[in-house]
Image (cartoon, grey):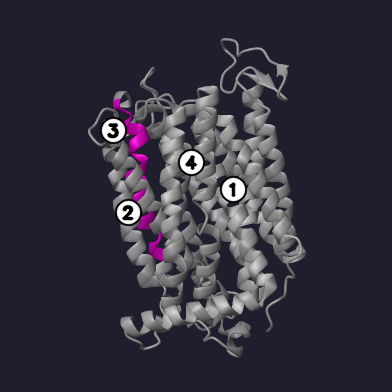
Amino acid sequence: MSATPPSPGPAAADPVSYPPRRAIAGWALFDWACQPFFTLVTTFVFAPFFAAALTPDPVEGQALWGYATAAAGLCLALLSPVLGSVADAAGPRKPWIAACGAVLSVACAALWFAAPGAAFAVPIALVAFAFATIAAEVAAVFNNAMMPFLVPPERLGRLSGLGWALGYAGGLLSLVIVLGFLAATPETGRTYFGIEPLFGLDPAVREGDRIVGPLSAAWFLVFVIPMFLFTPDVPRTGRRWREAASEGVARLRDTIVEARRDGGIIRFLAANMVYQDGLVALFAFGGIYGAGVFGWGATELGVFGILLTITGTIGALIGGRLDDRLGPKRVILGGLALLALVCVGILSLGRDHVGFVVATAPPAPGDGLYGSLPEKCFVALGLVIGAVAGPVQAGSRSLLARIVPPGDAGRYFGLLALSGKVTSFMAPLCVALATDLAGSQSAGLAVLIAFFAAGAVLLAPVPVRRASA
């Protein structure tokens, strides 16, 4: 089997022209390399630490984190489609991934300096988080654009699911490392494994929480190497950068015109825009919600993240096979329905009640983690989120990869990123505004139900065409 990716055109469908398995493994490890940033920084460790320790109260912390997430989403909306089109015109994707990886690593490392009581800790945390988010998401555009060159169309679902599953597994392992060996509670000075934190990390100044930034940077730099070594890149077109940029912008305009003529693609991109907004906000505020409503610390949040990533890994693998068997649209619609129901369930929980009005007893001494009934219900609902979020996201890139020409994958995945990010500031902004206005974290979460429902309504009539051989 040739290690050279197929050129755009009929030859791209020839199974003999697809690269060997090590190329697929290298591509999938990109998700493994990136995921600790999303797991440790965006969701389970640094974001709750920011809200609980760097800001005066969790409500203000959730609002500030929402504004930073919204700003990053707005930048992504402007950058992703243009850079994707430029990459199509120039050819190779790896140089762009390398540049984004450098920004991601530097920004993640800067999070270490956001210490409680330190000057400018809050601005450092927000700016570094925003830059890291932009770099990680833009790099994913170029990595996703390689998909049509790696496997035949009928295997795209499993390829996408494999990447998401490895990503969840990487997030799981990184959480275990942080929870068991690095992050100790200030009260006991011990990690969840009952040992003193490695490297002399001081729990009094939350070094175990802040170390997730440098850890995410180092993790990416190490595990992205197989992709650069084993996954073949798209050949160079011979155009200079300026020529590629000019042609790329022109091709982006053409792509938008083509997409507008195809009602199915427009509806899919609109649907993706809405439900991805909801997912961004759900993952951004899930850990913050648990910390604020139930008073969870690093241990509770870390174990919750481990459990969620286990179900996420299983869900992504199963979802990839269901994608190839049932089609990506059915997988996405089913996942959106479950996510909306989960949000309703979370809204019904409080520190002392479930089902909105059913009072519950507080946890008794010796009950252990998640001792109260509301906490147990929150954990159970979180496991459902983990199981269905991966298939929804993997199904989105699988659906697009099935219906676009391989040679134009960069610009179409740029549009996919645009549709996922052009209003990605809206859901976090709505959550932040609702939280501010109502003075309640529950009010912020309520808006996500509308995002998932609207996305499903837009996606339902979209015709799914299989890519021609």
Q: CA distance from mark 1 to mark 4?
A: 14 Å
Mark 1 and 4 residues: CB-CB less than 8 Å, in contact?
no
Q: Residue furthest left?
A: 119
Q: Is residue 131 left or right of residue 449?
A: left
Q: What amino acid is found at the position of numbered circle 3 in the picture?
A: Ala
| Element marked by disc 4 | helix
Q: Residues within 10 Å of mark 1 (few under 14, many from 20)?
A: many
Can you give x and y, in whole percent of width and height, for residue 101 in the image? Answer: 35, 60
Write down the residue under mark 4.
Answer: 43
Q: Residues within 10 Å of mark 2 (few under 14, many from 20)?
A: many
Can you give x and y, in whole percent of width and height, for residue 423 in the image? Answer: 52, 55
Q: Residue furthest top?
A: 365
| Element marked by disc 3 | loop
The mark found on residue 278 in the picture is 1
Mark 2 and 4 residues: CB-CB less than 8 Å, in contact?
no
Please state, as top left, top right, bottom left or bottom right, where the N terminus lies in the image.
Answer: bottom right
| Element marked by disc 1 | helix
Q: What amino acid is found at the position of numbered circle 2 in the picture?
A: Ser
What residue appears at the point 51 percent right and 59 percent down from the top-left corner? 422
Where 354 sits versus 313, above or below? Answer: above
Residue 61, quarter of the rendered image: top left
Of labels 1 and 4, earlier in sequence is 4
| Residue 207 inside the magenta-drawn segment | yes
Q: Which residues are magenta?
A: 205-226
Q: CA distance from mark 1 to mark 3?
A: 30 Å
Of labels 2 and 1, earlier in sequence is 2
Foreground pick, 29 / 136: 136
Write down the residue under mark 3.
Answer: 115
Write down the residue under mark 2.
Answer: 105
Can you give x and y, in whole percent of width and height, for residue 320 in the image? Answer: 66, 60
Q: CA distance from mark 2 to mark 1?
A: 26 Å
Of labels 1 and 3, earlier in sequence is 3
